[in-house]
Amino acid sequence: MAKVKVSVMHRDHIPGTPGSYGEESVRVVYGMLKEAIDAVGGLKSVIKNGDKVLVRANACWAVKPDSGIAADPRVVEAFMRLIRDETRPKEIIVADRSSIGADTAESFEVSGIKAAALRGGADRVLPLEQDQRVKVQIPDPMVLFRPVYLPKTMLEADVLIYLPKMKVHKLTLISLALKMNQGSLDWYDAIRNHRADMHQKMVDMLKVLRPHLSIIDALWPMQGQGPGSPYPEDLIKDFNVIVAGKDPVAVDTVGATLMGFEAKHDVPMLRAAEMKGLGVATLEDIEIYGGPIEKLKRPFRRGNIHLIGLHPKMEVYMGGACDGCLHFTRTGMDVYLANPKLMEEVEKITFILGRDVEIPEKLDHNPPRSYVFVVGDCSERHKDRGIFLPGCASTSMHRTFFPGKSADEVLENYRKVQPKKVNIEGYIYPED
């Protein structure tokens, strides 16, 4: 059986930064992209004349280009140019849906993706939460037994190309091509199975939304507390790597290897995808052009979702808490832990989460001086002991800004980022 091809391009030096670059920088990245894609068959093998092309560029949050959280504008601009130079599509759309509760239009603007895409030749930029949704039933699902609502524009595109940012993810270990499909879901479906079953969810999604080409942007990747780490030490500057291929599972396998992980051992979604016949996750079955990956790979620091022992002001009472509630709680708290001045505003923060959790008789809940947060549906029996943040998973502290806020103000912030439901015609409407 012929091996699957994946290319790995590296340059010792790329001028400028994601947020400040010139023409020479775009030319260097353009050359990397062209060589990488030519090695796996070329753009013309993917895009035909008159095709409607949708490029998913990772726009996780409204963050500056140099943060390493969103797709590098240099890659976006160079790739748009390459598509225009080598093919004749009917339309090029750059699209994404940002993290839960974030405004993708704002993310595209602040990250520089919109400007880079239009400058490079894209026809338009589409925040997917603004798109019409279509009800889709996943065939032979592992976890998504109920229908999901997917963007009509993605389903109608002739060509799907995914442009993920290379990042460690606290919940799934890696955030690469397969993980991009989390952003294909609306907020309501995004929260479903955002736990240990996220790996199975991404494999289910690959059955209905499979990119024809996947290109990992690893110019400035992220390790540690990704996918949106606030810690400066988690940004890896000038890694200067591009990974490309037509099999997204194989592309992610090579990407994970470059990050110092054993793909099949460490990443359940890759094992499961190969087992389901959706791609190749065995490194020995992949023909790698470029590299060499043994020289380029480095040990990316893993993220973690633990809450114990993080700060003297934090008290945690945790029963059988799942990965989902732990992930969202840690994601929100990392913002404060990375900025010590924010923690000066409160005297104590207590978290109650998980099933069968036992708590003391007295707790210090007196906003805005001190807070008790009761996180997730599993801990509902304690909801009267503090501020109850329901959900499965609960979005917990993710964008729930609390220092200096009353309990009512905290709850209002929490409600703003809660998932939206979708009606049968496919349009998003706010949950009552």
Image (cartoon, grey):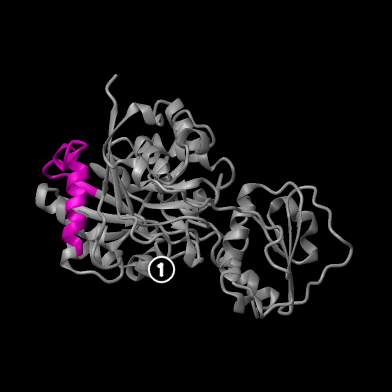
Q: Is residue 313 magenta?
A: no
Q: Position of residue 226 (x, y in %)?
A: 49, 56
Q: Is residue 32 above or below residue 210?
A: below
Residue at far right of view? 361
Question: Which quadrant is the N terminus positioned in?
Answer: top left
Where is mark 1, residue-wise? Answer: 63
**Circle 1: residue type:** Val
Q: Is residue 406 left or right of residue 47?
A: right
Magenta residues (range) = 25-53
Quarter assignment of residue 254: top left
Q: Nearer the viewer, residue 223 or 280?
A: 223
Q: Is residue 17 visible?
A: yes
Residue at 79% across, 64% down: 384
Residue at image coords 60%, 66%: 414
Residue 210 percent across, percent down from the top left: 34, 38
Which structural element holds mark 1?
loop
In x, y percent, where is residue 42?
16, 40
Instruction: Locate residue 336 relative to residue 104 in the image: left or right.
Output: right
Q: Is residue 231 above or below residue 36?
A: below
Q: Is residue 393 visible?
A: no
- Which residue shows up at 35% across the image and 46% down it? 296
Image quarter in which the C terminus is found:
bottom right
State the residue at coordinates (87%, 61%).
Answer: 360
Q: Is residue 234 or residue 367 the one in the foreground?
A: 234
Q: Quadrant of residue 407?
A: bottom right
Q: Is residue 37 magenta?
A: yes
**Which residue occupies the foreground of this view, 129 or 431?**
129
* Count of labels in the image: 1
